[in-house]
Amino acid sequence: MWNPRSRALDAALASSVTATLAAGDGLAMPPGTPPLWDGQRPTNQAEWIELGRRVFFAFPLRAEVFMEFALPRPELQAAVGVEHTPAGDFPGLVLFDDVDGRTRVGITCAVCHTTVEDGRLIIGAARRKFDYGKLRIAYHNETHEPVEAELMRRMATWGPGRADVTEDLDEDPVAIPDLWGLRDQSVLTQAGTIRHIGPAALAIRQETQLLHANHQRIRPPRELAWALAMYLYSLAPPPRESPVTPEVTRGRALFDDTCRKCHDNAAYGGEPVPAARVGTDRALADGGARGTGTYRPAPLLRIFAAGPYFHHGAVPTLEDVLSPERLQPGYTRSPLRPGPVPGHEYGTDLSADDRAALVAFLKTL
């Protein structure tokens, strides 16, 4: 069971690591750094959640040479969405001792599932500006490290907030999801690959992700996988004021009439729906690694900030999701490519006023 020494890259450590990388020297863990976990099993829920927070921010998924490449290059960081807080901390990046004994920069869950908005760290929000494919391409272009031409082509198609992280031949990059409302979901992942029958299912899912991300070289202690699940259950969108206007009230009624049949749980998600019924791009639903033939209705918590929309990030705004123009050949607003974005036609037959009211309600969630 792997319990490495690991430290989140706060401003001071990030400065030191960046200088070391820029000089071409080897990294070293600061003396006296303990293992991530002290081995003491929590005795109450608050302690489990706090341990899970440490896992979320500090347990390394793997060493990440691309982040080691980006840290001394602030212009590249800005271009690909490697975020830091106003204080200079890098959420999701750690310095850790790898299984081979080398000290490396690694990534954690927080590299994709936190973002900085107006100077605040929003935990659980997808990092939609993070262009992992562009970062990897920049690394290979400058270092001339060998890479297959087909992989370079595919990475160039991902774009911000999307990645294809399965090791198969399918071309099915997906949008990074928010993590709120997991407790209320009956299945996990956009294609509904795992039946979520309770916290053990989520803990096993986290354990498997940690294991696979490091290419089966490590297995985390079961306590850490459970703690991470408890922390993810605790996440909620930041509170915000949502004035109830007549338009919002009408939008709520339209939601109940038009959308509630699929988005029917407490997080405004729901049971998987056959991909043929949804009608959106089927690459993920039919993929070899994660194909179930279905898509999970996305939880709609804080949906106003969750664009681009659909599982593959093909639609830029909520207004576009509901607009019939999205279905037409002349549509040009998709961040992926010009042309229609078919599927999920629910609400596109409403009047312009009703669509506006529905959007007004969705922006209160």
Image (cartoon, helix red, strand yellow):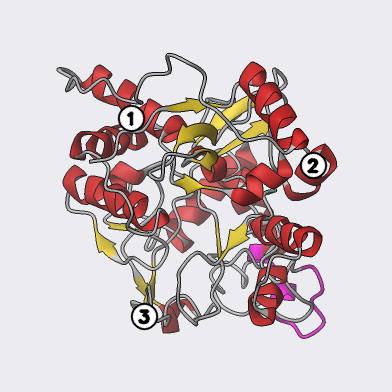
Q: What residue range appears in magenta?
A: 321-333
Residue in front for this viewpoint, 208 or 193: 208
> Circle 3: is it few (<14), some (14-19), or many (20+) Cα within 10 Å?
some
Q: Name the amino acid type tagged 2.
A: Ala
Q: Name the amino acid type tagged 3.
A: Gly
Percent x, y for residue 60? 44, 40
- Calculate the distance from the C-alpha at mark 3 to the C-alpha at mark 1: 32 Å
- Calculate the distance from the C-alpha at mark 2 to the C-alpha at mark 1: 29 Å
Percent x, y for residue 297? 42, 62
Task: Find disc 1 in the rendering and name its residue.
Answer: 52
Mark 1 or mark 2, which is nearer the start of the sequence?
1
Mark 3 or mark 2, which is nearer the start of the sequence?
2
Task: Find disc 2 in the rendering and name its residue.
Answer: 78
Residue 325: say if magenta: yes
Q: In percent of the image, x 18 and y 19: which residue is there? A: 40
Is residue 212 at least partly visible in the picture? Answer: yes
Left or right for 170, reference 41: right
Q: In percent of the image, x 17 and y 46: which residue is there? A: 200
Question: Which quadrant holds residue 82?
Answer: top right
Rendered view: 157 above or below 40: below
